[in-house]
Structure formats: structure tokens, C-alpha cells
Image (cartoon, helix red, strand yellow):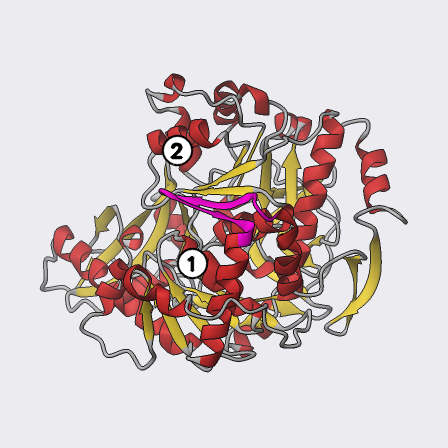
Amino acid sequence: MHHKLPQIEGSLCGPGGPFELVEEFVLGERLRVFRHRASSLRNLLEASAAFGSREYIVCGDRRLTYADHLRAVASVAQTLQQRYGVGKGDRVGILAANHPEWIVTFWAAVSLGAVAVGLNGWWVTDEILYALEDAAPKVLVADRRRLSRLERTRLPIPSIEIESEFDILLAGDQAALPRTAIGEDDPACILYTSGTTGRPKGVVNSHRNILALVGIQSFHGLRAFLIREQPPPSSPAMLVTSPLFHVSGLYAGAVICLATGIKSVWMQGRFDPVRAMRLIQAERVTNWGPMGTVAYRFVNHPEVGQFDLSSVTGFGSGGAPMASDLQERLCRVFPAARGSSALGYGLTECTALATLNFGEEVLRMPWSAGRSLPTVEVEIRDPSGRHLPEGEEGEICIRGPTVMLGYWRRPVETQQAIASGRWLRTGDIGRIEEGHLIINSRARDLILRGAENISPQEIESRLLEHPQIEEAAVIGVDHEELGQEVKAVVVPKSDTAPDVRGLQAWVAEKLAYYKVPAHWEIRRAPLPRNAVGKIMKHLLREGARSPFTEDE
């Protein structure tokens, strides 16, 4: 730990500090919160007027200043309210690539006290329809490409195509923002996450949740500059390569930038290392959070030395520990950012971030997910809920103002996920060492491909619908670039011989491309199961024989 860190953190979070911590009741529990905070996302939006002529969104050939953005949001909010009847608590669906209109619609919805629903832009028709039925939005704002996936479906709600119809939403008279009363614990956003139950679940994040993340990230930004004893860049610019339907694109990108007056530079479409290099050079990008495979592809690209990347003073990542050789390569590519890298751990269920490993600690403990951030408590617990001491492995549990309200319309799953005292049970396994969280990533049931969480059960369910499949198990296998890839182990019915291409097409018909298994194993012997009939996936990963026999 940096020798100045305790003193710096004390001055920031202590009495009279800009991030002073106090205890307050939140949803019936006494929690640590920041004393100085906005009470709604609309307050944050109103405060952004101070950034006026500064650029907020750069996307393709379009540039929106903070003043432009505020006028657009006021118009869209007014039209959503008057023409489409959107009021407090109503949902507004957004299904699109990273467009300025995505961001404007989000802010318009939350400023009305409505709930923005970020739908996964990679979903196929079946998944989109499932989420629309689940969230039941009053209106859907979508781009042409994604609406084309729904062409043969009669939608029960009005849809607005971004390319040709968004002007309808901008037709308001640019009045002031809505005045609807908004409570801190009112829902603001639903983002869908893959879970071990198969179908994606809608995570409901409140205004308090998202604003608590703003506080945490702003605290860390100031802490990092104080440790390095250098002023923040005069014209900060953040490159965002994550999709807006992810916490990393929406909350850590669009919301954080608006809260701090940063220019957000958006990449559309699939990640292209050379386009990212061009954007960094042209827009003088100072910060970037490459997720999953993106950093690997960037630093290993043959053209990386042909661009001026000297403006980057900070980079961070999350989802999985970053190999030390990759960290070293990033430092060589971004020399001005050496010593300022950060690796975070969090879930959509705790609004993106719970712990952070940064600076000198990343070099000393590259396998660590870092220490917990202010307002966030992290405990390791055994299956009975007992708090385990340092060094012992168990379930990672998180408490604080960032913990979600719950899963949308899923009271049973919410009750299972949020234990007494509003402790979030993450389902991840880890331990605490020297105050640092160490995650046992192999204990995850989910497959982490790039920055995408993939539910094995969702793919297994699809495979078991195939007329030739008797048994199916889906596991993650290690991959140098993506972290993990999807592997399916299937047992065909005795008189059949399914082919791999046909099985891939079967999965692709109902699920997004990244969920389609890249590796297949077709076996005739039954899958190894334990005494209660559960498939023992660790044996499939290790290629070992089952210790059980059929009659045990």
C-alpha cells in the first residue's frame, strides 16, 4: 500500500471531507453513505448545465455539447410524457447500438421518474421478445438493425426507429426538465444479466444505487491524482468501447462522464483496435476501460506503434484478473498511464463496482480484485451465512447503497440473492488476504467470454429441445484472448448421430452468437452425475471419470 494512502483516504472521507461518510437508514438498514450526494439522477442532469459548451458525446461524426444534450433530453422527456403517456414507474425500452439517442433516451426516462430498460443489442428475436414481455415497456426506442429482427412480430407497444423517427421525440418545445417527485430509492434502470437460472433476469438499479457509484468513482479519481501528486488533465476524455446495455458502458461511461463534465468518445459496432487507436489520437483520450478481450487485442495489434497514444493517463478493467504480462504491455503502450492502472470487481447487482485494485498494489498483487471501496462492505461467508475469517474461502457477499433493489418481477430470486441485512449473495467464491479480495474464478458457474457473462443453463435448455439430444452440459474452457469460450458436451439419443454444424445452427436460431458453443464433444456414455442427479461439471472440465456409479 502507498504510504500516503491512509492519510489521503482519511482526508477525503473524514468529517468535512468532500466524500464524508455518515450512517443513514437505507431500505430499513443502517448503511454507510456519502453525506454530500445528489438525490436523483435528474439532479445530476440539472447540474450538468454548468458544463454548457463542453462536449459531452462524440460518436461517429456527431458531437453534442452538454447544453445540446440537456435541450434534447428536455424535449424527449416532454414527448414521452405527453405523446406516449410515460409517467413515474413506467418502463422505456432501449434497444440499439451505442448511439447518442440511446443516452438521450436514458436521461429523458430517468428524469421523468420512469425506468430505462437497456435491452441487450446482441440478442436475437426470441431473447428480445422475452425481455419485452418481461419488462412491459410503454414504448420502445430502437435502431433499424435491431427492429429488423422483430419485423415478423407484431409488437404490442409503439416503437420509435432512431434513424428515421427520433425527430418525433425531439419535437417537444425544449421546456425545462420534468418536475415529477423522485425518491432516492425509486427504480431508475433495468439491465438484464445472465444468471444460473437460465433466462436473463432484469436487475433493478435505483437512483441511489447509480449515484452511489458516481460517488465511489469520483472518490477514486481524486484519490488517484492525490497519490500521484499531479493535477487532473485539463480536457479529460473517456473512450467507451463497452455497449450501453452494460453497466460499464452506461453507468461507468455515460453517467460518470455527465457527472464530472468529461467528454465521452463512443465506438460503434464491433471493437476494432485500429479505430480505437485513431479515436484516442484524434480526441486526445485520457481514460479508457478496456473490458475482457479488448485490451489483449489492442496491445497485440501490429499497428499499435503507429499512433500517438500519449494522452492516455489512466486505464482500468474488470470482470477478471489481468495477467501481469498484459498489464506490462499496456504500460508500454500507454507510458503516461504507468502506475495508474485499476482492476475492479463488481456485478450489475451491485451497480458495477465493489472493490478496486490500483496503482502500486496492482503490480504487487496482480491476482487481487483489490480492497472494498467507501460505502461498500465485503464479507466472505459459508453456506449457512456465517462470516468467515481472513484467508478462508467462501461466498463473496456485498452490502452498501449500491446493492440493487432486486430482480424485476422475481421476488423469489430476489429473496435468494439479498440476505438479511441487505447483504447481496454474489454466488462468486473468494477469500480476503491483507484486506484484498481474491476471487476463485474457476468456482463461477457462469462462463465469462470477453466481457459477456453467459449462462450455461440457457444453452443447455436449448440443446435439450433438440430431438436428437438426450443429455447436455455446457462449460467454459480457457482461451488466451477471450478468457473463456463455450464448450458443449452432449449425449445423443441411442439411434441418432447429430452433426456439430446442425447443433450450432440450432442454438444460433434462438440465442445470440456469443452463446453458440465453439467447442463440442459428442459422447455415448451418460454424463457424470452425483448422488442427487446433478451433473458434475468439474469432471467434464478435467476429463476425469465419475466416482459414482448408476446405483449409488
Please indicate whether residue 170 sits to the left or right of residue 381 in the image. Answer: left
**Residue 213 percent across, percent down from the top left:** 64, 53
Q: CA distance from mark 2 to mark 1?
A: 21 Å
Dot 2 falls on a residue whose secondary structure is helix
The reply to whether the C-beta atoms of the residues labelled 2 and 1 are less than 8 Å apart is no
Picture layout, residue 119 above or below residue 235: below
Crowd tier of the residue under label 1, counting other residues whose Cα lies within 10 Å: few below 14, some 14–19, many 20 or above: many
Q: Quadrant of residue 337?
A: top right
State the residue position of label 1. Answer: 102
Q: Is residue 530 visible?
A: yes
Query: Which residue does the image show at 36% across and 42% down from the upper left?
Result: 61
Q: Is residue 384 visible?
A: no
**Residue 531 percent across, percent down from the top left:** 43, 65
Q: Which residues are magenta?
A: 52-67
User: Residue type at mark 1?
Assistant: Trp
State the residue position of label 2. Answer: 276
Query: Which residue does the image show at 55% across and 67% down from the upper left?
Result: 110
Numbered badge on residue 79: none
- Farthest-out residue, right: 15
Query: Which residue does the image show at 60% across and 65% down from the upper left?
Result: 404
Quadrant where the N terminus is found in the figure:
top right
Task: Confirm whether the magenta stretch covers residue 427.
Answer: no
Q: Can you tell which of label 2 and label 1 is closer to the viewer?
A: 1
Please indicate whether residue 22 sits to the left or right of residue 434 in the image. Answer: right
Is 325 or 143 nearer to us in this picture? 143
